[in-house]
Image: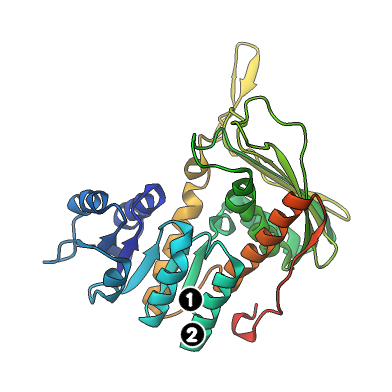
Amino acid sequence: MDVRVGVIGVGMIGQDHIRRITQVLTGGSVTAVNDVDTARAGQVAAVLPGVGQHRVSVHATAQDLIADGNVDAVLVASWGPAHEEQVVAAIGAGKPVFCEKPLAPASDACLRIMEAEMAAGRRLVQVGFMRRYDAGYRAMKAALDDSGIGAPLLMHCAHRNPSVPDYGFTTDMIISDSAVHEMDIVRWLFGEEIVAATVLTPRRAGQAPDGLQDPLILLLEMANGVLVDDELFVSARYGYDVRGEVVCETGTVALADVSEVTVRAQNRYGGRVPVDWRDRFIRAYDAELQEWLNAVAAGSAAGPSSWDGYAAAAVTDAALEALRTGQRTAVSMPERPEFYAK
């Protein structure tokens, strides 16, 4: 089965997913697009091949795209505040949906998505937490699951960006847009929920944009007692650098250097630092979307669920409160519904 995908949101990540589906992956095609910028949607559709006698449709609204009979599944890559309405509409239409993170910016919106999905009676949503598909993180999880180095005790993380957009990026977004990836990956690595968050504010970097407290240190407490420290530095200038090391009882496991080669010349050696998140995680993005297409074709569901999207939003809420107050903040969330059992 060739899955006919309708894409809502054709900005940077939306166009990258379209390229992925049409040029890299198997089992999928793009048959419809929608964007708040209708002209941009038309430009994107004009260069796509279409399927058979059907050209790629450009829809004025997300709801029209979801209702399109030439769309089997929906990929949501619009801005976060629009996700709830669009994902719930796809669920209502009985169509599988891949939703880029966040599932929704607010945890109560994520709960409403979960309620709609549970009412539908089957999993229809996969959330775009791509780090779970990264070869390094998968090898790290395999080492932890093997238990050869004992129980995990703590984890050191770093999330460094060369820069942020010149406009609109706030200190809160360091938590909601950047740290959310670590929030999800540590839940997946340890198979435990996060129960509390604390945010520390080190000396502010001189190159940080006006009004931005950068860097931050996020401390996460897992239900099993594991502590996670996450350095968040979004104006580091030198490149996109994601690090992770888990300290266990009798050993450690860490992400390897992601440089493809090491060059030695003129009494020096060095490697390459990724340019941005697309560069660093390109294969992970490929793997997650291929898994989604395969699952849709098989009539099943895989990958991060709506519960995972909700859990990340609940931890984000706690971390933002900790940022505002300077106090340790407990994460408030109900028990995981049986519908989303591990």
For mark 1, does the 10 Å Cα neighbourhood hold few (<14), some (14 to 19), or many (20 or more) residues?
A: many
Q: Position of residue 86 (x, y in %)?
A: 40, 69
- The residue where tag 2 is placed is 122
Task: Give me the residue at 48% from left, 76% from top.
Answer: 301
Task: Give me the residue at 67% from left, 46% from top.
Answer: 255
Q: Report the front residue among 56 and 113.
A: 113
Res. 290 in view: yes
Disc number lying in front (1 or 2): 2
The part of the image, by quadrant, that contains residue 221 is: bottom right
Determine whether the residue tagged by mark 2 lies in a helix, strand or loop.
loop
For mark 2, does the 10 Å Cα neighbourhood hold few (<14), some (14 to 19), or many (20 or more) residues?
A: some
The part of the image, by quadrant, that contains residue 316 is: bottom right
What is the quadrant of the C terminus in the image? bottom right
Q: Position of residue 130 (x, y in %)?
A: 53, 56
Res. 2 in view: no
- Seen as rendered, the residue at the extreme left is 53
Question: Eyeballing the image, is 67 above or below 184?
Answer: below
Residue type at tag 2? Arg
Q: Position of residue 28 (x, y in %)?
A: 31, 65
The part of the image, by quadrant, that contains residue 270 is: top right
Residue type at tag 1? Ala
What is the quadrant of the N terminus in the image? bottom left
- The residue where tag 1 is placed is 301
